Image (spheres, rainbow, N blue to C red):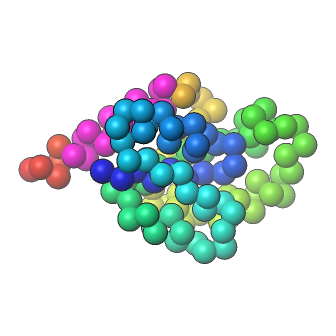
Amino acid sequence: MRIVLVGPCGSGKTTIAERLREHGVDAVAVGQEHSIIRDLWRRPEPDLVVFLDASLSVIRERRGDDWPEWLYCVELERLADARANADLVIDTGRYTVEAVVQRVLALARDRARNEQR
């Protein structure tokens, strides 16, 4: 099962993808926020799309206090289609990395069970 992770810069895509791969999951972090191609997130042909959300204040804690609000807003606009089509939206500012990983793994297990029926 391929899981695609999308979200604004600093939302945790790379970290979560690495942790999911440690669990044997085919996880891909897609830099949709950098692209004007609205459906770039579809290109890896995901079985699940997970949108990792984070507020501007959380992004600034992770990336630096000078992270521009205008850039954050542009990224959210570019990510609107991916968010609308996501199987799961998680606010990474509210959970630990491990909690996010476990929620994604639980969704993947549920989806796999449903596909076997």
Q: Residue at x 45, y 67 (%)?
A: 42
Q: Give the total of numbered labels.
A: 0
Residue 20 falls in image quadrant: top left
Q: Residue at x 61, y 58 (%)?
A: 31
Horizontal and vertical percent position of residue 61: 78, 32
Above or below, 2 relative to 104: below
Q: Is residue 3 left or right of residue 32?
A: left
Q: Is residue 87 visible?
A: no
Name the foreground residue: 9 vs 23. 23
Name the foreground residue: 3 vs 83. 3
Q: Is residue 56 left or right of residue 117?
A: right
- The region drawn magenta spans 98-112
Name the foreground residue: 21 vs 112. 21
Above or below, 21 relative to 79: above
Residue 76 in magenta stretch? no
**In the displayed image of the protein, which residue is found farthest to the right?**
66
**In the displayed image of the protein, which residue is found farthest to the bottom?**
37
Q: Residue at x 26, y 39 (%)?
A: 109
Residue 109 in magenta stretch? yes
Horizontal and vertical percent position of residue 80: 59, 63
Residue 47 falls in image quadrant: bottom left
Q: Is residue 58 visible?
A: yes
Q: Residue at x 58, y 43 (%)?
A: 14
Horizontal and vertical percent position of residue 74: 75, 62
Q: Main secondary structure of the magenta part?
A: helix
Q: Is residue 25 left or right of residue 32?
A: left
Q: Is residue 70 left or right of residue 97?
A: right
Horizontal and vertical percent position of residue 59: 74, 40
